Amino acid sequence: MPVPYRLYVNNRKESPTKGMWYARACYYGQKTTDELADDIAAATTLTKTDIVACITAFLHYINVALQQGQRVTLDKFGSFKVGIKTSPAESAKAFNPTKNVKSLHVIFQPAVYATADHKRFKSLLTGVKVEEYGSYHVDKGDTPTP
């Protein structure tokens, strides 16, 4: 099933592309850990309990590695690392992590591969297609709707 999208018009006042149309991905629901465990159990010899235990341990040890300042790389999937948002300091000596570090976030970078003709692709997006979402209204005329 393709990934659905909805069209929207850019209404930002100062944008050089104001009035132009874009697409946003939307979703038909979500897949929970429990549902993924059911799918994996049906496709393998593992039990659902084994899979849930493995996922729980997997997430715990990714967290431990990130706490230790490591980048976590999962082959054919991607990598995780910690990003930091800070406020500026007048000098290196004046930088104080308690004062200047505003927040932490996780950066995910999907695995990227190159084909024989040197085209790059993200492994998680192999075979993904898109289609317009069926149950919403948008005027596709030349003038944007308010």
Image: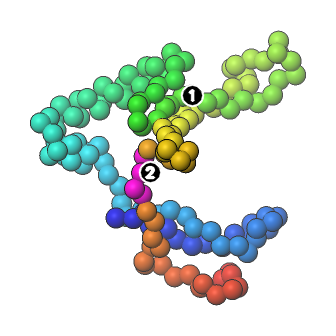
Q: Does the magenta stretch include residue 125?
A: yes
Most extreme residue toward the right, as rendered? Answer: 90
Characterize the local packing of mark 1: few (<14), some (14-19) or many (20 or more) Cα atoms within 10 angstroms. some
**How many other residues sit within 10 Å of disc 2, few (<14), some (14-19) or many (≥20)?**
few
* Position above or below: 88 against 144: above
**49 lies left or right of 1:** left
The kind of residue on which mark 1 rests is Val
* Dominant SS type (magenta): loop
Please state the horizontal and vertical placement of residue 78, each as a whole percent of the image. 46, 35
Nearer to us in this view, 27 or 130: 130
Residue 82 marker: 1
Whole-angstrom CA distance, mark 1 to mark 2, is 23 Å
Quarter of the figure that contains the N terminus: bottom left
**Element marked by disc 1:** strand
For residue 23: magenta? Answer: no
Q: Which of 63/117 is in front?
A: 117
Q: What residue type is labelled 2?
A: Leu
Magenta residue span: 124-128
User: Is label 1 in contact with label 2 (beta carbons under 8 Å)?
Assistant: no
Residue at x 54% of width, y 28% of height: 81
Q: In which quadrant is the C terminus drawn? A: bottom right
Q: In this view, does 98 lie to the left or right of 43?
A: right
Q: Where is residue 26 in the image (x, y as percent from the top left)?
A: 47, 63
What percent of the width, then of the height, locates residue 68?
51, 15
Task: Give the mark, 1 or 2, whose residue is nearer the N terminus.
Answer: 1
Q: Which mark is residue 125?
A: 2
* Image position of 123 (left or right of 36): right
Specify the quadrant of the image occupied by residue 51: top left
